[in-house]
Amino acid sequence: MAFYCLLVVLQNLMISLCLETSGETHNKKNVLFVISHPDDESMFFSPTINYLTANAYNIHVLCLSTGNMPYHTFYISVTLSYSIQIVRKFVPLQQLKIVDHPNLQDGFRQVWSHDLLEEIISEEVISHDIHTIITFDDYGCTLRLVLIPEKFLQTNSERNIKAWELVSLNTFRKYGGPIDIWLSILSAKRHGSKVIIINEQPLKSYEAMAQHLSQWVWFRKLFVSFSSYTYTNTLQRISP
């Protein structure tokens, strides 16, 4: 346990060098998570949310689909807000946006328009003065859809937006639980553009996912318990 705490302290120092710059104003701490489904924040991003809220970052969440859930968007927003509150901090409903668009439906065969994504993401970035975007990589952890079109970063280069993607893991590492912390650290040493974030309170991920009652079935309980994403996140900088 003591060594785990030491790892957390060291990783906090490393992340500070990558995610922060000297003399940042308050608006420079506005971070937007772009996710596919309303439970992605607890299944995949809780280590990152935990770190950012502990360091006074202002969290915004853009969820690009309802996950085809038969509930009203407002109800899903409340659930998402409470889920993040369990992890570390209450996020006001006005900082959560769930998109219910006919062309952004859930499903493995669905293809989302990059032009539509760029329009929606740009609106959020401008309206909330977002400085950093965090989302999935091309593989999307478990076949989540590609969320950040390259064109978006190119056309918004003057805003100096930092974009980071959650690195997807192969099946062996994905279910390695806390053991994968060591493999993630070794991988990051070989790639200077990667940052490792270790979850200080992994049990909070389990509690957060439990807020999504319709999704809290036995196999998701197993996923959150053994998933490497519960214990650590590896973020890689997205280049325009």
Image (spheres, rainbow, N blue to C red):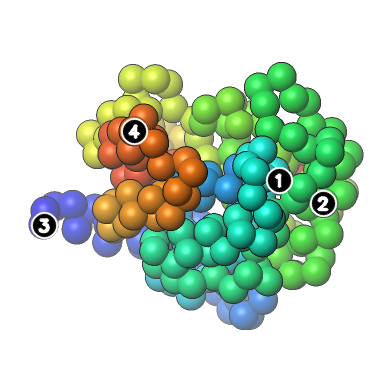
* Residue at far front of view: 70
Up/down of 150 relative to 153, above or below: above
Residue 118, percent from left and from top: 83, 46
* Numbered mark located on residue 218 in the image: 4
For image coordinates 74% across by 25% down, the residue present is 110
* Numbered mark located on residue 141 in the image: none
Residue contact at pointers 4 and 3, CB within 8 angstroms: no
Q: Which residue is mark 3?
A: 2
Instruction: Please tell me how crowded label 1 is: few (under 14), some (14-19), or many (20+) other residues with Cα within 10 Å.
Output: many
Q: Which residue is mark 2?
A: 120
Real-space CA distance between mark 2 and mark 3, rounded to the nearest whole angstrom: 44 Å
- Quarter of the image where the C terminus is located: top right
Q: Name the residue type under label 4.
A: Trp
Real-space CA distance between mark 4 and mark 1, rounded to the nearest whole angstrom: 25 Å
Q: Name the residue type under label 2.
A: Ile
The label nearer to you, 4 versus 1, is 4
Residue 53, percent from left and from top: 46, 68
For image coordinates 27% across by 53% down, the residue present is 203
Up/down of 126 relative to 190, above or below: below
Instruction: Please tell me how crowded label 2 is: few (under 14), some (14-19), or many (20+) other residues with Cα within 10 Å.
Output: some
Residue 72, percent from left and from top: 68, 54
Real-space CA distance between mark 1 and mark 3, rounded to the nearest whole angstrom: 40 Å
Of the numbered discs 2 and 1, the one sitting upstream in the chain is: 1
Residue contact at pointers 2 and 1, CB within 8 angstroms: yes
Q: Provide the secondary structure element on which disc 4 rests.
A: helix
Quick check: 17 left or right of 151? left
Instruction: Please tell me how crowded label 3 is: few (under 14), some (14-19), or many (20+) other residues with Cα within 10 Å.
Output: few
Residue 90, percent from left and from top: 48, 72
Q: Name the residue type under label 1.
A: Leu
* Numbered mark located on residue 64 in the image: 1
